[in-house]
């Protein structure tokens, strides 16, 4: 289990305050003033230690823009992100080492982020070495791989021979090996079939509980957060339009966008987790 994380003064672990970001649209007429398209509009949110939060919205709603700001990959036009009462903004690897040890990322397409020339063991050890995590790195990689449901025989494998579900488990192990306080996951099961989705979501939920890690799960599918998350945020056109406990949101959506997402959700297999989770 991870040590209790340091928090902001308001008790949150990670906070976005009044974030705004826009991009300039291409214009075919040079004499016209360029138009700006807003991606985020005065958006604020707070993530608390150990909670599992879903961030849901259609394509183009601003989820990726917000995620990149939270990961210190992009600087917003206005507003700021704070973690443990420290500002978070793009900086050098050394300057952000404290943040990378506190917050880790699980990508949508793990195969594209795993170096095909390296073994799984080398891939799991890399963040431990780069972030200077004080532990036995060989023992930690073995323990973490078993925690995501893979045998240690996979340590000698290279990513090219892994199935989609196995590759996603390796990506989860790579992110959790350093024992971060929070995981940010971008559509982590969108490329998997339904049985594998259930398995991977259950792994994320179990690790969050056992290690005390918070989880922000970004998706377009409400059925995914129904199985995994205690609280759900809904984005629409760069704004947060809902912030409710997941059970309440599913039973009584307040915004038309939420109702549409609920209609488009997967069959009830994923929703069952919401009814059976302790």
Image (cartoon, rainbow, N blue to C red):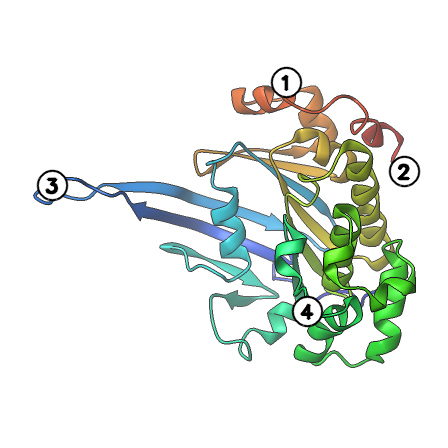
- Number of marks: 4
Of mark 4 and mark 2, the one earlier in the sequence is 4
| Residue 217 drawn above or below residue 76 | above
- Image point (69%, 38%), residue name: 231
Please rate how many residues cluster around mark 4, counting C-alpha atoms within 10 Å: few if below 14, some from 14 to 19, many from 20.
Answer: few
**One can see residue 50 in this view:** no
Locate residue 254, reporting x and y percent: 58, 22
> 92 or 164, which lies in front?
164
In three-dimensional space, the C-alpha distance between marks 2 and 3, rounded to whole angstroms, equals: 58 Å
In three-dimensional space, the C-alpha distance between marks 4 and 2, rounded to whole angstroms, equals: 42 Å
Which quarter of the image is occupied by the C terminus? top right
The image quarter in which residue 127 lies: bottom right
Which residue is tagged 2?
A: 278
Locate residue 276, reporting x and y percent: 89, 31
Please rate how many residues cluster around mark 1, counting C-alpha atoms within 10 Å: few if below 14, some from 14 to 19, many from 20.
Answer: few
Which residue is tagged 4?
A: 117
| Image-based side of 210 in relation to 244, left or right | right
Of mark 1 and mark 3, the one earlier in the sequence is 3
Q: Give the label, 2 or 3, closer to the camera.
A: 3
In three-dimensional space, the C-alpha distance between marks 4 and 3, rounded to whole angstroms, equals: 50 Å
Locate residue 72, reporting x and y percent: 51, 62
Which residue is tagged 1?
A: 263
Which residue is tagged 3?
A: 32
Q: Secondary structure at mark 1?
A: helix
């Amino acid at each position: 289990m991870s040590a209790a994380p340091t928090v902001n003064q308001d008790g949150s672990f990670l906070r976005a305050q009044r974030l705004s970001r826009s991009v300039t649209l291409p214009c075919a007429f040079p004499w016209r003033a360029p138009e700006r398209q807003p991606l985020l509009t005065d958006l604020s949110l707070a993530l608390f230690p150990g909670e599992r939060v879903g961030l849901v919205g259609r394509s183009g709603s601003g989820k990726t823009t917000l995620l990149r700001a939270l990961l210190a990959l992009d600087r917003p036009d206005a507003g700021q992100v704070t973690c443990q009462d420290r500002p978070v903004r793009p900086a050098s690897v050394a300057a952000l080492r404290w943040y990378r040890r506190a917050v880790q990322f699980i990508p949508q397409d793990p195969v594209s982020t795993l170096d095909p020339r390296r073994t799984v063991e080398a891939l799991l050890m890399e963040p431990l070495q780069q972030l200077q995590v004080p532990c036995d790195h060989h023992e930690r990689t073995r323990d973490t791989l078993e925690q995501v449901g893979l045998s240690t025989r996979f340590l000698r494998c290279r990513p090219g021979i892994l199935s989609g579900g196995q590759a996603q488990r390796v990506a989860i192990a790579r992110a959790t090996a350093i024992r971060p306080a929070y995981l940010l996951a971008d559509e982590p099961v969108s490329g998997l079939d339904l049985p594998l989705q259930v398995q991977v979501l259950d792994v994320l939920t179990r690790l969050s509980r056992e290690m005390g890690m918070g989880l922000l799960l970004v998706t377009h599918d409400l059925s995914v957060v129904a199985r995994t998350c205690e609280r759900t945020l809904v984005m629409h056109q760069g704004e947060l339009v809902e912030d409710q406990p997941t059970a309440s949101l599913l039973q009584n959506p307040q915004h038309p966008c939420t109702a549409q997402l609920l209609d488009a959700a997967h069959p009830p297999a994923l929703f069952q987790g919401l009814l059976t989770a302790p």
